[in-house]
Image (tube, helix red, strand yellow):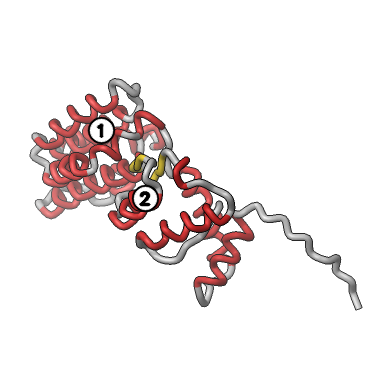
Amino acid sequence: MLYVAEGRSSLAVEEFAQALVAHGGDCQRIQWVAMDMLHCYAKGVREHFPRARIVYDRFHLMVMAGEAVDEVRRSLQRQGADLKGALWTLRGNPWNLEPDQLQTRTRLARKYKPLGRALALRAALQDVYKASTQEGPELLKRWCKWAARSRLAPFKKLAQTFRQYWDGIVSYFQCRITQGAIEAINGIIQLAKRRARGFRNFVYLRVIAYWVAGQLKANLPPYLPT
């Protein structure tokens, strides 16, 4: 972890750019920036890292696909579908499920066709991200056409979102970077935050973040008992 900024705005990106220059870095040398779909962050990158290409995080996009499946499930429940207790069976990846959960998932997908289409769309999107640099954008384009014709409102909306952020999404196939590292660091910080029962202000949070995730070496004087 190099820098912690307060807030969710383009100003946070500007502060990082200033800190990078102050420590001898060069904003012109940044080639790729992995991020989620916040307009303010994209604005900050365009203004302060002019040669960088934005890469929208694939895991963030898969979360959006999972949320679309959830919306389809809730819609079916409101229409009377018997899906009570199937929330965690329908979430996530099939290879993480127990055999009985996988059986239930398959049965529900066959019984409720919209749910089956939603699960198939999510699984297909995951496969798209395994494609080569050349094939990835074309396969994603086909996926968006399928989602738009799926008669599933959440996936039609997701396809529109993908088209809106197209350049940043297909950039992944060229560089293959994600936010995985920063999410791992965030997990370390959140654990420290829970252990401290929270912090009164941002300054204290930033200090502990640097301490637990910044790989700092503090030359403290030895403790001398009195």
Q: Position of residue 81 (x, y in %)?
A: 14, 48
Q: Tell me the quadrant of the picture where the C terminus can be found.
A: bottom right
| Nearer to us in this view, 27 or 75 | 27
Q: Is residue 52 above or below residue 120?
A: below
The residue to which callout 1 is attached is 106
Q: Residue drawn 55% across and 65% down?
A: 206
Q: Position of residue 11 (x, y in %)?
A: 39, 62
* Mark 1 secondary-structure assignment: helix
Q: Residue drawn 58% across and 50% down?
A: 24
Q: Residue drawn 26% across and 36% down?
A: 122
In the visual, does 212 lie left or right of 6?
A: right
Quick check: marks 2 and 1 in contact, CB under 8 Å? no
Q: Position of residue 217 (x, y in %)?
A: 72, 55
Is residue 189 visible in the rendered image? The answer is: yes
- Badge 1 amino acid: Thr
Q: Position of residue 102 (x, y in %)?
A: 33, 34
CA neighbours of label 2 inside 10 A, class few (<14), some (14 to 19), many (20+): many
CA neighbours of label 1 inside 10 A, class few (<14), some (14 to 19), many (20+): some
Q: Residue drawn 11% across and 37% down?
A: 148
The residue to which callout 2 is attached is 45
Q: Is residue 115 above or below residue 83?
A: above
- Badge 2 amino acid: Val
* Mark 2 secondary-structure assignment: helix
The answer for how far apart the CA atoms under marks 2 and 1 are is 43 Å
In the visual, does 146 lie left or right of 102?
A: left
Q: Quadrant of residue 171?
A: top left
